[in-house]
Image (cartoon, helix red, strand yellow):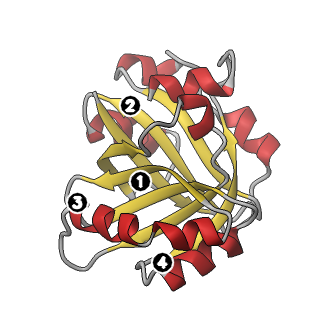
């Protein structure tokens, strides 16, 4: 199974309640047919954007049902997850800030990870902690999750560390409808 991410921007802000209502239950409709598992979405606190995370055999398995639902899939990509060492899944589930990174040329994950590790003190200074990265298989896109007091703390730490980023935003997680807890949804991903 692959990790598939869909980045979305909304012309009209979405509410957390709206996203929760539309979150697919495991095995729902075409998702079950294509063996797609919805894991979690991250909705910007201002409702302007979201990232939806799925597990599926391949990207087309997610693209097909989302298109049938009228969802824009222009920013759908396959990637790998990289978690912070020695963190349990409950801690990772406490992330609340997302950093978007894009690269004009493919970049090896190890080079970005080394840069982040060398500048870890910048995060600590701003009260932020790295939780997880989603890294595109083509090496051109990366999303990083942090636990921090606010988005500005992470933004300041990224600037101080001279880490490349496109956007930094606070989010609320949207879990599968029948998830027993936040932890179980993250544990499975």
Q: Are marks 3 and 1 in contact (CB under 8 Å)?
A: no
Of 150 and 136, nearer the camera is: 150
Tell me the number on the disc at residue 55. Answer: 2
Give coordinates of residue 130: x percent, y percent. 52, 55
Give the mark nearest the N terminus, 4 or 2. 2
Q: Determine the image quadrant of residue 104.
A: bottom left
* Closer to viewer: mark 3 or mark 2: 3
Circles 4 and 3, Cβ within 8 Å, touching? The answer is no
Discs 1/4, front: 4
93 versus 108 height, above or below: above
Say which element carries label 1. loop
Which of the marked residues, 3 or 2, is nearer the chain's N terminus?
2
- Nearer to me, 10 or 53: 53
- Which residue is denoted by mark 3 in the rendering? 110
Residue that numbered label 4 is attached to: 166
The span from disc 1 to disc 4 (Cα, nearest Å) is 20 Å
Which is in the foreground here, disc 4 or disc 2? 4
Inter-mark Cα distance, 3 to 1: 28 Å
**Residue under the image location 67 percent in, 43 percent down:** 173
C-beta proximity under 8 Å, tags 2 and 1: no
Residue assigned mark 1: 73
């Amino acid at each position: 199974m692959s990790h598939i991410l869909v980045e979305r921007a909304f012309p009209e802000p979405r509410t957390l309640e709206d996203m929760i209502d539309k979150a697919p239950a495991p095995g729902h409709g075409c998702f079950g047919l294509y063996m797609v598992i919805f894991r979690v979405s991250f909705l910007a606190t201002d409702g302007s954007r979201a990232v939806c995370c799925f597990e599926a055999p391949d990207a087309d398995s997610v693209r097909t049902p989302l298109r049938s639902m009228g969802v824009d899939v222009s920013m759908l990509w396959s990637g790998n997850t990289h978690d912070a060492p020695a963190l349990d899944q409950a801690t990772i589930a406490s992330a609340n800030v997302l950093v978007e990174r894009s690269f004009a040329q493919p970049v090896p994950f190890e080079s970005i990870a080394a840069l982040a590790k060398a500048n870890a003190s910048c995060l600590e200074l701003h009260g932020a902690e790295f939780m997880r990265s989603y890294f595109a298989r083509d090496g051109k896109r990366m999303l990083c999750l942090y636990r921090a007091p606010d988005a500005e703390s992470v933004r300041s730490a990224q600037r101080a560390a001279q880490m490349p980023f496109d956007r930094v935003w606070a989010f609320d997680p949207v879990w599968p409808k029948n998830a027993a807890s936040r932890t179980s949804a993250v544990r499975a991903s």
